[in-house]
Amino acid sequence: MPFIDHATKTIAIKVVYYGPGLSGKTTNLRYIYYKLDPAFRGELVCLETEADRTYFFDLLPIRAGLIGDFKVHYQLLATPGQVFYEASRKSVLRGADGIVFVADSQIPLLDANLESFDGLRRNCLQQDIDLMRLPLVFQYNKRDLSYLIPVETFNNLLNPRRQPWVEAVAIDGVGVFETLREISKLTVPPVREKLFGARPRTEPDTADPAGPDFDGPPEGDGAKAPTNSTTRILRKSRREIEAELDRLSREYIGKSRG
Ligand SMILES: Nc1nc2c(ncn2[C@@H]2O[C@H](COP(=O)(O)OP(=O)(O)O)[C@@H](O)[C@H]2O)c(=O)[nH]1
Ligand SMILES: [Mg+2]
């Protein structure tokens, strides 16, 4: 369910990057952060608990264009991959408007991908999220390496409904904005319908995070995302982290008004 503020005419669309540990989720967010003009993105933060680090994920708020006359913000969230962070992954999925499943293309990691996708299914079920109806894009990452899982195999195993998929080398930025564009194409129509019903559109939506406002160099230009672009935020408990997430996204929406 997107966050819609009718008073300020702003919408926040939440996109969760999900996948096995080390598949490249943080790398995607870093690259987006690094390429977008600072005017169109907030800080990339890593939220974690002080005590046991049992709860952490990355958050990047970005500004896109308009749906009707509503300003659109995307909140990109990357889940932690390790098995023992199940609780974090579950609560991060709450209220997700779309999911990018970042798979690791290396053959030895086939099982890890399948297990992670199973976990996604299970967590959605427990959160009353219908994964069959949620916008979902697959990113088959690390295509620069050898011994790769063929795209066809990935699609047969993970993506029988043939939702959009993108082959990526996130570390070089290849496919990163393409993935973001695909998920935005899928997340905008349900929001539009929620706002304006099914009536025909009068003006085109511009809520593509890699769209008209994006004037960075073309993706895959060989530039690597810097590895130290994340601000760390420590909080005591999971509840405090969730409150912080709320605060950060609202603060960003507030700041980027006008
Ligand atoms: N070769 C290669 N390495 C990648 C690619 N994307 C990410 N990595 C590396 O994989 C590791 C894990 O990436 P990270 O984004 O932290 O994974 P996360 O656990 O999904 O957030 C890092 O060392 C990245 O540099 C890629 O496309 N190709
Ligand atoms: Mg990560």
Image (tube, rainbow, N blue to C red):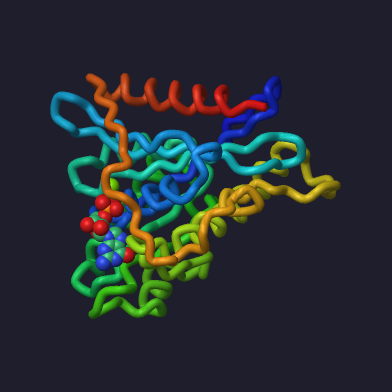
Residue depicted at x 41% and y 48% = 34
Q: Is residue 104 visible?
A: no
* Viewer-nearest residue: 247 or 3: 247
Is 202 placed above or below 104 here?
Answer: above
* Relative side of 155 to 209, left or right: left
Whole-percent x and y of residue 16? Answer: 43, 45
* Relative side of 10 to 202, left or right: left
Is 215 placed above or below 220 here?
Answer: above
* Relative side of 9 to 43, left or right: right
Whole-percent x and y of residue 135? Answer: 54, 53
* Relative side of 204 to 115, left or right: right
* Viewer-nearest residue: 64 or 132: 64
Looking at the rendering, which quadrant does residue 90 occupy?
top left
Residue depicted at x 50% and y 58% = 177
Whole-percent x and y of residue 39? Answer: 54, 37
Q: Is residue 101 visible?
A: yes
Quadrant holding the C terminus? top right
Residue farthest left in this picture: 52
Residue depicted at x 20% and y 48% = 82
Residue depicted at x 51% and y 27% = 252
Whole-percent x and y of residue 197? Answer: 77, 41
Quadrant holding the N terminus? top right
Count the marks: how many? 0
